[in-house]
């Protein structure tokens, strides 16, 4: 579910999420 939210967010947010993983 979180992945979907990340996609909606800008690219910057996506990269940040990836780091958290």
Image (spheres, helix red, strand yellow):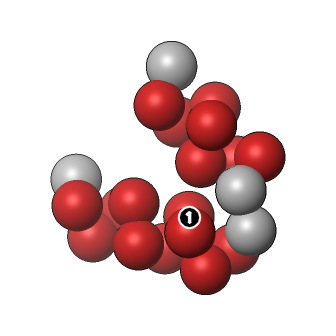
For disc 1, the neighbor class at 10 Å (few under 14, some 14 to 19, many from 20) is some
Residue 10 picture location, percent across and down: 74, 68
Name the side, left or right, on which 12 lies relative to 3.
right
Q: How many marks?
A: 1
Residue 11 picture location, percent across and down: 69, 74
Name the side, left or right, on which 19 lies relative to 6.
left
Q: Residue furthest bottom?
A: 12
Name the side, left or right, on which 16 lies relative to 4.
left
Q: Quarter of the image holding residue 13?
A: bottom right
Name the side, left or right, on which 16 lies relative to 9.
left
Q: Above or below — where is 20 with respect to 16?
A: above
Residue found 77% across the figure and 46% down from its top: 8
Residue 2 picture location, percent across and down: 47, 31
Q: Label 1, secondary structure: give it.
A: helix
Residue found 70% across the figure and 47% down from its top: 7
Closer to the camera, 19 or 13? 13
Q: Above or below — where is 18 with respect to 5?
A: below
Residue found 39% across the figure and 60% down from its top: 17
Residue 12 picture location, percent across and down: 61, 80
Q: Above or below — where is 6 with respect to 13?
A: above
Q: Which residue is mark 1?
A: 14
Q: Above or below — where is 10 with respect to 5?
A: below
């Amino acid at each position: 579910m979180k992945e979907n939210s990340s996609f909606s967010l800008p690219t910057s947010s996506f990269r940040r999420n990836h780091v958290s993983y």
